[in-house]
Image (tube, rainbow, N blue to C red):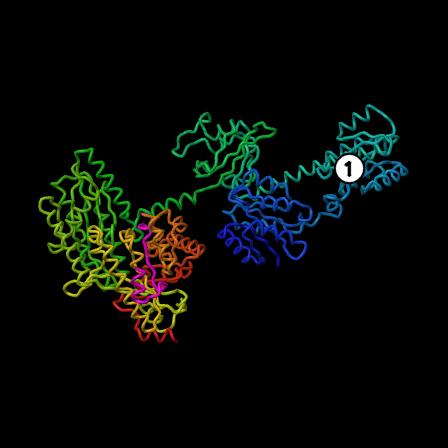
Amino acid sequence: MKKVLLIELSATLRHAAKKLMENSGYDVTEVSSFSNGFAKISRIEHDFECNIVLLGWPAKTDDIADELFATLEEPQYQNLSVIVLSHEADTAKLAWVTKRSKTALVLWENYSEIIDAISSLTVDKQPASNWESIAHGETTPMRVLFVDDSPTVRVTYRRLLTQAGYITDTASCVEEGMEKAVANYYDIGIIDYYMPDGTGDTLCRMIRDNPDTNHITTAIITGTYSDKAIIGSLGAGAVECMFKNEAKELFLSRIDAMSRSINAMRNVQNDHKRLEGILTSVGDGVYGVDRQGLITFINPAAKEILGYSDSDKMIGQSAHQLFHHTLEDGTSNPIASCQLQKAYQNGKQFRAWATMFIHADRNFIPVECTVYPLYLDKNLHGSVVAFRDVTERRLLLEELKWQATHDPLTKLPNRSYFETQLLKEVKRLKRSKESSCLLYLDLDRFKYLNDTAGHNAGDKLLIAVGKQLLGKLRAADSLARIGGDEFAIIMRNIDSASAFTAADKFREVLDTYRFNYSGKTYKINVSIGVAFIDDGIKSSGEVLANADIACFIAKGKGRNQTHIFSPESDEKAAMDIELGWSARLHDALEQNQFVLNFQPIVALADLDINALPQEDGKIWEQVSNRPTIDGIYHYEVLLRLQDSRGQLIRPDAFLPTAERFNMMAAIDRWVIKRAIQSLAVQDNNGAHMCLSINLSGQTLEDENLAAYIHNISQQYAVSPGSLLFEITETSAIANLEAANAFISKLRDLGYQFALDDFGSGFCSFSHLKFLPVDEIKIDGIFIQGMMHDTVDKAIISSIVQIAHTVGKRTVAEFVENAEILKQLKQVGVDYVQGYYIAEPSATMLDQGDAANKVAG
C-alpha cells in the first residue's frame, strides 16, 4: 500500500482529502502544521516511510512552509511525488510546480482529481528501447555516433570519446551512418566530410530532415580546410566544423560545449512539457494572448468549456472575435470598449471577474476569470487568463435565492418576500393617487383536518389551496403563504367600490372546491380580511395589522366570510382583542393557567433505521422501554395556555401579544421555574432527564436572568448539565454581544445552549464562530422540504458537516415520517424530534419506569 503524507492546515479540507485517499486504498498520515510536516519529511530516510506528499499551499507567507518547499527541491527527495493543493493557480505556484520534477498542481474545488494526478506521477514509464532510456537519463553520458571511412580514425576517436565519458558508436559511410541513426538513439553525430559514398553534409541534411533523427546535433570533422565544405555543412544543419589535426583537448572542449547546449535545450523542452502537462491537467480553462489579443496558447480545459475540439485551430486567432464579442443582453461588445481587450493591451489585472463568454454553439457561458499580465524581461507581452464555468454555481445561487423567498411546500412566495413586496407597494402609493388592497386569508378549521387526517393531508390541502387561489389571481396581483394556514394577496390598482367583490371571489372559489384525500371529501372554507392601501397609510405593518384584524372579525362572524377593515368601527375591536389577550396573560401568570408540555428528543444512535414503524409515536414507545445510549432522556419544554373550557391554546395565538406588551421575560421565568421543578421531581426518583427550554429575544435583555436561572437550579438541587437553553438565531444576532456574554456566563457554570432555527439566514455559518453553543437545531423549513427538494437536503448536509467540524451536535425538528428520518440519518444528524417520534405530552416518561431503566 502506498504511503501518503497529507499536510494541510484546514481541518475540513484535510478531512475531505484524507477520506478520498483512504477510499482509494492509500495509507494516509495527516499533519495539521508545516512544522510537523517538515519533521516528517526530514525522517523519510530514517524511520518514516512515505511515497507521496499532499501539500496544501499556505494562504500567507510562512517561514517553515518556505523551508519545507526548499527541502523538497533537494536531490535526496527528487523521487518523492508531490501534489500541491491550492484554491487558485497563480504564477508562484505554477513556477514551483514547473521547476520540480514529479510534481503536480490540483485545485481544491477539483480535489477528486488528486488520484488521477498521483497516477500520472507514479506510473512506471518503460523506455522505447535501451538506447532511449539511457539517453534521456539526467546524469548519464551523451551518446555519440562517429562516422568516418578510416578504421584508424574511428578507433582513435572512439577511445578518446569513451575515455571522456561519452558512449560512442561508429559507422564507416553515409549509408551505414543513417541506418544507425534511425535504428538507435544518439545525442551527437560527428561526421567526416569526405567519404566514398558521399560527403558529410549529405548525411547532416538527411539526419536533419528525418523526423526520427532530427533531434541529433551534428558536426563535421575533416582533415582538409575548405570554405565550400564548411559552408555546405553549416547549411545542412551542422553546428560545428572541426579538424582532425587540432589538439584533442580542443576537440573534447567543442564536444563538451555541444553537450552543454543540448542539455540546456533539453531542460527548456522539459520545462515546456511540464508546463504543458500542468496546463493540460488543470481543470480551469487557461489561455494566453499577446497585446493585440491574439491567442498564443490554450489548454484542453479551455477548449472544452468553450465548445471547441482538440483539432480546432485557435492559436493566432482573436480571443475577442471568438468568445467575448457580445454582452449578455445580446448587444455588441466593441473591441475598443471591451474590458478584457483593454487588459490585454495595458497589462491590467482582474481577479475573480464575472463576465460572459460565448460557446461555440453561440450560447452564453457565465464565467469567472482572472487576468494576469505577462511580463518578459520587464516588457509587457500580453496576458494569461484563467477562467472557470460558473453555470452550476449561478444556478445554485439562484436556487438559494429562491429558497430564501419561497415556501418549499406550496412553492408560493413566503412571508419574507411578501413583506418586501408590501413595503414596495406602500411606498409606491405614497406618490400616487391610486389605491390597492391587502387580503389576509385564514383557512377555517384547518387544524381539525390536520389532526384527524394527518399532516400529509394538511400539506396536500395547502398545496391545493395555493393552486386554487393562483387560478383567480390577476397578472398584477401577488400571492404568498405567510403562515401555517394563512395566505396573503396584494391586489394592485383596485378601488373601494370593487374591492369586496374582487376579494370575495377568492372565498367563493374555495367554498365551491372539494378536497379529496384517502377516499374522503372535505369542504374547505376561508375567512378573508381586507385592508386598503393608499397615500394615507403610514407603514406596511399598519396594513398587515388592519388586514389581520379584519380577518379576525370575519371569523367572529361565523367563518367563511369576507370583511373589509373600517378604521371607524374596527380599531376598537382590535384594541379589545389585544387588551383581552393581555389581561388573560396576566391572569395566567398569577393563577398558574399556563401548562408545560414535553416533546421527546431522540438520538438517532438509539434507533434501528432498518426497522422503523409507520405509525406516529411508536418510536418513542420503543425508546422509552429501554435505556438510551447516553443514559439520558431528552425533552423540549413547550408552553400552552389553558382556556376556561380546559382546552389548550398553542403559543402562536398569544405570544405575539405577550411580545407587544413586553411580557415575555415574565413568561420565560415562569417556564424556567416550572421546568426546573419538574426536573427536580424526576431527579428525586432516580431518572436522568435533560430539558431544552426556549428563551425569547426580550428575555435575553434581562441582565439578572443568568443569576435567576442559577439560583432556581440551586434551590431545587438540579444539575446545570441537565438544562439546555434554546435561543433562536434571529434573536441571538440581534444583540450578538449580549447573547455571547449571557451564554458564556452560564456555560461556565455547566449549562448547555442550542442555536434554534439555524440556517434561516445567509450568514448562519459565521455565527458559529461567535456564539459558544453546544447544539444546532436546524430550521424546520429545510426538514419539511428535504424529501422533494435536493437543495434543502444539501443545505442540511452542509450544516451537519460544519457543525460536527466545530464540535457541535445537530437536532432536526418537524420529523413527520420514516422517510425523512432515514434521510436525516444518511446526512449524519444526531438527534430528531417531531410528531412522528412523539407528540408533546403533559408528562415525561413515567418516573418509576425511568428510574428502573436507567438503573438497568
Q: Residue at x 63, y 53 (%)?
A: 51
Query: For the view shown, which residue lies furthest in the right direction?
Result: 152
Q: Quadrant of the C terminus?
A: bottom left
Q: Nearer the viewer, residue 488 or 318?
A: 488
- In the image, residue 368 sits, relative to residue 294, either above or below, namely below
In which quadrant of the rendered view does residue 148 lie?
A: top right
Indicate the position of residue 104 as horizontal and vertical percent values.
59, 45
Residue 778: x percent and y percent? 35, 55
Indicate left or right for 449 with 782 as reference: left
Relative placement, left or right, of 71 versus 405 is right
Q: Secondary structure at mark 1?
A: strand
Q: Is residue 727 magenta?
A: yes
Q: Check the image and report above or below for 827 versus 733.
A: below
Mark 1 neighbour class, 10 Å CA radius: few under 14, some 14 to 19, many 20 or more: many
Q: Quadrant of the N terminus?
A: bottom right
State the residue lying farthest toward the top: 227
Q: Which residues are magenta?
A: 709-734
Label 1 amino acid? Ile
Residue 162, magenta (yes or no): no
Instruction: Give left or right: position of 742 versus 170.
Output: left
Q: Which residue is mark 1?
A: 188
Q: Is residue 349 above or below residue 653?
A: above
Residue 565 x %, y %: 13, 46
Q: Residue furthest left?
A: 569
Residue 689 higher or lower than 198, as above or below: below
Q: Is residue 218 left or right of residue 851?
A: right
